[in-house]
Image (cartoon, grey):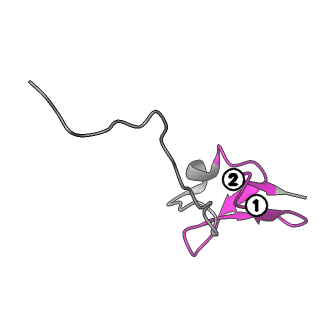
Amino acid sequence: MTSNNLCSDHVEVNWEPPSEEPICDNLGDCHGWKHSTCSKTNRCLCNANYEWNGEHLSCIE
């Protein structure tokens, strides 16, 4: 068996962090996201004095 396909020894992965807070249906869904609460818009919104950071996937001061 022979093959003319060349193999590469590396893989390139591209990822863009999410720009919005995680989706939730109830308060329990935001349990793993510190400093956030499930809102009426079904998002784990950051509490006062915190803002969403997509690179760190968390609410930061």
> Which three-letter amino acid code belongs to the residue tagged 1?
Asn
Give the answer, above or below, for where 51 lies relative to 10: below
The residue at the point 65 percent across, 43 percent down is 32
The residue at the point 49 percent across, 60 percent down is 25
Callout 1 environment at 10 Å: few (<14), some (14 to 19), or many (20+)? some
Which span is picked out in magenta? 31-59
Would residue 23 be found to the left or right of residue 59 on screen? left
In what element is the residue under mark 1? strand
- Which label number is shown at residue 57? 2
Q: Main secondary structure of the magenta part?
A: loop
Residues tagged 2 and 1 counted as in contact (Cβ below 8 A): yes
Residue beneath label 1, please?
A: 53
In what element is the residue under mark 2? loop
The residue at the point 46 percent across, 33 percent down is 9
Would residue 29 be found to the left or right of residue 60 on screen? left
> Which three-letter amino acid code belongs to the residue tagged 2?
Leu
Q: Is residue 54 magenta?
A: yes
- Give whichever of 60, 41 is nearer the camera: 60
- Give whichever of 24, 14 is nearer the camera: 14
- Which label number is shown at residue 43? none
Give the answer, above or below, for where 10 lies relative to 13: above
